Amino acid sequence: MSNETNETTEVEMESTMETEATKTPELDLSSPEAKKLMESMVAEQLAQMKDNMNKMSKQRDEAMRKAVELEESAKAAKLEKLEAEGKTSEALQMKLDEALARVDALTSVNTSLTRDHQVDKLLSEQQFRNATAREMAKAQIVGELKQDAEGGWVHATGAPLGEFVQAFAKDEENAFLFKPKQSTGAAAMQAVNSEGGAMPKSDKPIGEMSFEDFLKADQGNNQQDFGF
């Protein structure tokens, strides 16, 4: 193939690519369609993560169940052997150790329930996208907690639990877990003013208004009535 043919082919390819690029419209990320698409993508990702978490939980529970069964069988066989050999004191000590281990396990469960209750109470104040997002947040928060000298639950750094949950909710990396916040109050008033809308009518007598308040009201609505 000649150089001229190669150059012609390259020119045609570049022309085709430019045409395709021209045909592809740019997506306006601020449009309702784009926001809806992003919400759908986030929901799909959360659903997939929930499925993975459920599968991992089932596998973990099954592995733990089998391990407990093997351990119980081994203990029963050892205890039976000690009693058959007439080693009564050793058999009694083994039963005592097992009873103490059960007490420790029950204490651990009770401690975990107390921790989960405190975390659930704090998370109830937040607006999550769905139950899956809430479960993910809880799992991450619980994984970073420890007990202080008095038995209370705090962050690994020593920060109070409430402060840690608030910081977690404000972290931009965790924003996908929460519902988008609506602009209200002063922010909404500022947005209306920036779009050319009139500021709300003031019920405050003009004699009680500061000069700055008077200028803001006058700029927002030149025909505004003031009470005297």
Image: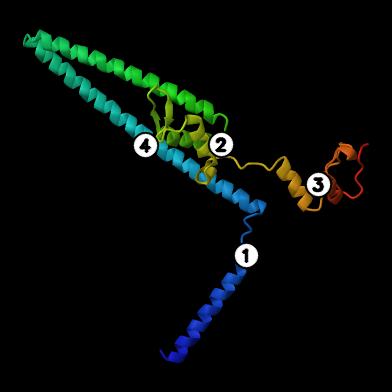
Between label 2 and label 1, give the one nearer the viewer: 2
Above or below, 8 against 18 in this view is below
Q: Report, in whole angstroms, how far the alpha carbon at label 2 lies from the one at label 1.
A: 33 Å
Nearest to the observer: residue 218 or residue 210: 210
Quarter residue 184 falls in: top right
Residue at (46%, 91%) from the top-left corner?
4
Q: Is residue 88 left or right of residue 139?
A: left
Q: Amino acid at mark 1?
A: Pro
Element at badge 1? loop
Q: Report, in whole angstroms, how far the alpha carbon at label 4 lies from the one at label 2.
A: 23 Å
Nearest to the observer: residue 155 or residue 110: 155
Looking at the image, tell me whether mark 4 or mark 2 is earlier in sequence order: 4
Q: Which residue is mark 2?
A: 128
Between label 3 and label 2, give the one nearer the viewer: 3
Q: Report, in whole angstroms, how far the alpha carbon at label 3 lies from the one at label 2.
A: 40 Å
Q: Report, in whole angstroms, how far the alpha carbon at label 1 lies from the one at label 4.
A: 41 Å
Report x, y in % for residue 139. Answer: 43, 34
Element at badge 3? helix
Using a 10 Å C-alpha cutoff, classify the residue at mark 2 as few (fewer than 14 neighbours), some (14 to 19) or many (20 or more): many
Q: Which residue is mark 3?
A: 212
Looking at the image, tell me whether mark 1 or mark 4 is earlier in sequence order: 1
Q: Report, in whole angstroms, how far the alpha carbon at label 3 lies from the one at label 1.
A: 47 Å
Q: Report, in whole angstroms, how far the alpha carbon at label 4 lies from the one at label 3.
A: 61 Å
Looking at the image, tell me whether mark 3 or mark 2 is earlier in sequence order: 2
What's the mark number on residue 25?
Answer: 1
Q: Which residue is mark 4?
A: 56
Q: Amino acid at mark 3?
A: Glu
